[in-house]
Amino acid sequence: MIRSATPVTMIAIAAALALALALPVIAPGYYVQFASKAMLMGMLALSLNLIVGFGGLVSLCHGAFFGLAGYMLGFLTPDSGGASLWLSLPVALLTVAAVAAIIGALSLRTRGIYFIMVTLAFGEMLFYLFHDTRIGGGSDGMYIYFKPEIAIAGSALLDLEKSNTFFYVALACLVGTALLIRGLVRSPFGHALVAARDNERRALSLGFPVFRLRLAAFVISAMIAGLAGYFSAAQFGFVAPQLLGWHLSATMLVMVVLGGMSSILGPLVGALALIGLEEVLKSSFEHWKLIKGLIIIGLVFALPGGLQQLAAMLQTGSSQVPDLGADVAEPVPAPAGEARSHV
């Protein structure tokens, strides 16, 4: 069954998109750069939600994919200028996909808490690979002095050194990511992934290739995280082993839970809310991390369905969790005696 977003939600999305398009014109440069960072973090949350919210797989190694793509940009950037985006981005994403395929093929043979532990172990292995060796500058990380170049036949199409241009590229990546995940969730692939999440044995009995479905979702999710990591490294011109550690993966999970896992754009709202909350608290309080933790705990207790539950309460006065921002795929029971076709 496909549950469509309400008209009110669609209007809110259109208004938010219009505001985002106008932001570089009406806001100072600092806020444009901050919004770019927030959108990249939103992409991270969306990537994790594909396997957490729709696949039922809690991964603690997605930060490693984020950082690995940033390191690949650093390795491919020459000392004399920026790396070609047409070359460096595919190489970074393919590297992330290859690593994710290996990690996923091994991790997906476990379930529950064991899957979490295995992904955490792989993430920490990648962290120490860069932290304790000379690869990428060791514990000091590496600088990326030039942003990627987007050019054809020597003619620059876009200049990512300009904050406004970078903002629009990040916005395009975010919108593209949301549309991609929406398409995946609405497709037979998404239905099968949700069916495996809800009842793996029944999905297997109906003929779904559950292992391959989950592995494909894991790799796609990792590549989206890598895309965010690539542009994050380009924005800040620096990448360090800390980006590969479990702390970032845990922060991503907080974003997903804070926004709500039963929708596509809920984690994006959670990411923007968390990044915005941090920015406000940093400028007002010395021990802002303690206050942030207390606020998040309070929100989790008050809104078990995430911020999307608050949106439902404001719209209808009901505490029922809605679909925030896009359609959600639910498994449709197959008629008795009829098995679904393979995806």
Image: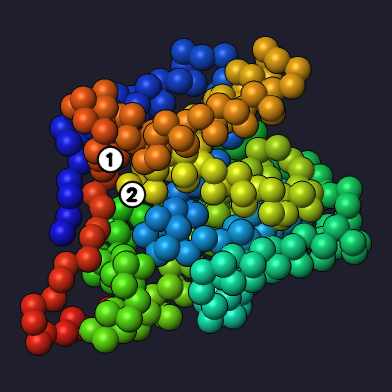
The answer to which quarter of the image holds residue 335 is bottom left
Q: Could you tell me which secondary element the residue under label 2 belongs to?
A: loop
Comparing 125 with 25, the one in front is: 125
Residue highlighted by disc 2 = 262
Residue drawn at 60 percent across, 44 percent down = 251
Please give left or right for residue 248 compared with residue 262 in the image: right
Residue plotted at (64% across, 24% down) = 291
Per the image, the residue denoted by label 1 is 321
Q: Is residue 232 above or below residue 119?
A: above
The structure residue drawn at horizontal position 29% and vertical position 79%, both measured from the top left corner, is 203
Please indicate whether residue 90 sits to the left or right of residue 282 in the image. Answer: left
Residue 256: in sight, yes or no? yes
On residue 63, which mark appears?
none
Q: Count up the numbered dots.
A: 2
- Camera sees residue 269: no
Residue type marked 2: Ser
Marks 1 and 2 sit apart, C-alpha to C-alpha, by 8 Å
Cβ–Cβ below 8 Å for labels 1 and 2? yes
Residue 93 point in image, percent of width and height? 57, 63
Looking at the image, which residue is at 56% across and 61% down? 59
**CA neighbours of label 2 inside 10 A, class few (<14), some (14 to 19), many (20+):** many
Asked whether 130 or 163 is in front, the reply is 130
Outermost residue to the front = 301
Q: Position of residue 81 (x, y in %)?
A: 75, 46
Q: Is residue 129 above or below residue 335?
A: above
Q: Earlier in the sequence, mark 1 or mark 2?
A: 2
- Within 10 angstroms of label 1, few (less than 14), some, or many (20 or more) residues? many
**In this rendering, the label closer to the viewer, 1 or 2:** 1
